[in-house]
Image (spheres, rainbow, N blue to C red):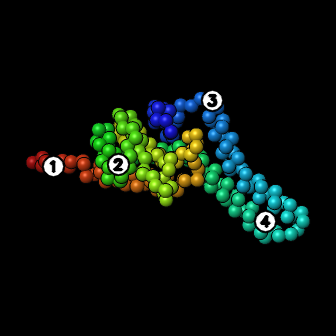
Amino acid sequence: MRYDKIDIPKSKEKGRVVRKTWLIEPIFDFLTYVVLVGAYPIFSGFFFFDQLEKKEHLVGASVLFGLALVFGGLLLYSIINLDRLKRINGALKDQNRQAIKDLTEKLGLTLQIHNQQVSVLSPPWSWFSTNWGRQVVVIYDRQDILINSTSYGLHDMKSPFHWFGNRKLERLVKDNFEEEIKNDTPTKPIRNAG
């Protein structure tokens, strides 16, 4: 994904990663997702109703149709939540940026972009990993950070099939960020008023 496509102010306002795109991209994405979500239930539904008319193999057809509905529902949920940003309480903006930089080195991630507004992290990729095309976007918002992990496929198409892996990577970044902030924030001595 190109990093200049992220609209930082709109992303902060909406709580989602908002990208600057031209008109055809959202239409293409929408049509692709409709086909992905709808194909399984529609084809298994045709098979189920065909078997219902013939009164043959109803158990197998109904199980297949039920599984297709569940799979389609999970894909729909994943697509709806692909760009959602998770807010994490931090410290000062510079401390947050330094904590992200430190945890990037600690976790072995690649820091692709790191400026005052946004950082983009990528996990290492190997032949036996599912990290190809996965990125973590970190947006700095006052004393908080907003994070989102997304996997990209061909032509910057967001993959709904890696939802669980993306949430796991977000949780890993969140836990390590909170630990970095906790270790970095100095404690102030309490003075007695007496």
- How many tags in the picture? 4
**110 or 182: nearer the viewer:** 110
SS of the residue at dot 3?
A: loop
Lower sequence index among marks 4 and 3: 3
Label 2: which residue? 104
The residue sitting at 18% across, 47% down in the picture is: 188
Sort mark 1 into few (<14), some (14-19) or many (20+) by Cα contacts within 10 Å: few
63, above or below 171, in the image: below
Label 1: which residue? 189
Quadrant position of residue 154: top right
Lower sequence index among marks 4 and 2: 4
Of tags 1 and 4, which is closer to the observer? 4
Residue 87 at least partly seen: no
SS of the residue at dot 4?
A: helix
Expressed as whole percent of the image width and height from the top left, the position of residue 123 reads: 42, 50
Label 3: which residue? 23
